[in-house]
Amino acid sequence: MIIRIMGEGQYRAPETLCDELNQIDNRIVDLVEEGKAEEFRNELARLISEIKQKGEPIEAEEILESDIIVPPGDLSFEEAKDVFKGSGIFQD
């Protein structure tokens, strides 16, 4: 799966990583629904960190369509309400 972190590039992620990321994504959805802004920011930073640490960076010259687009780490809590809802950015 190809994941783009907005403003930071693309990463190739194995299925096992995607399962882990989906769990974080689901937690973010719950935190946004519960109005827990600080915890949301921590989990979004964790999501991005996991992608960077465990995913394989894709060179900027390589043009690939992204399967998932992750918002930037500075996403506001208000903006998150439009992004992290339902099943989130990773489909269950």
Image: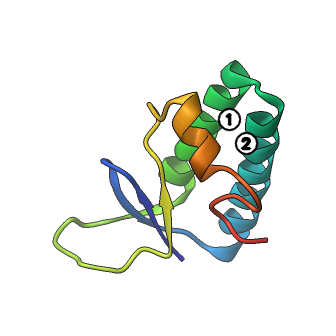
Among the 4 quarters of the image, the one containing residue 14: bottom right
Among the 4 quarters of the image, the one containing residue 81: top right
Camera-nearest residue between 72 and 13: 72
Task: Tell me if mark 2 has few (under 14), some (14-19) or many (20+) residues whose alpha carbon lies within 10 angstroms of its own.
Answer: many
Q: Residue furthest left?
A: 61
- Residue at left 73%, top 36%? 32
Which residue lies under the disc numbered 2? 28
Residue 7 relative to residue 77: left or right: left
The image shows residue 64, relative to residue 11, as above or below, that is: below
Among the 4 quarters of the image, the one containing residue 17: bottom right
Residue 68 relative to residue 57: left or right: right
- Residue at left 68%, top 35%? 43
Q: Secondary structure at mark 2?
A: helix
Disc 2 versus disc 1: nearer the observer: 2
x, y (%) of residue 86?
76, 59
Which residue lies under the disc numbered 1? 43
- Residue at left 76%, top 24%? 36
Residue 7 relative to residue 27: left or right: left
Amino acid type shown at disc 2: Ile
Q: Quadrant of the N terminus?
A: bottom right
Task: Tell me if mark 1 has few (under 14), some (14-19) or many (20+) residues whose alpha carbon lies within 10 angstroms of its own.
Answer: some
Q: Are marks 2 and 1 in contact (CB under 8 Å)?
A: yes
- Residue at left 44%, top 31%? 74
Mark 2 and mark 1: Cα distance apart in space: 6 Å
Q: Earlier in the sequence, mark 2 or mark 1?
A: 2
The image shows residue 91, relative to residue 20, as above or below, that is: below
x, y (%) of residue 76?
50, 30
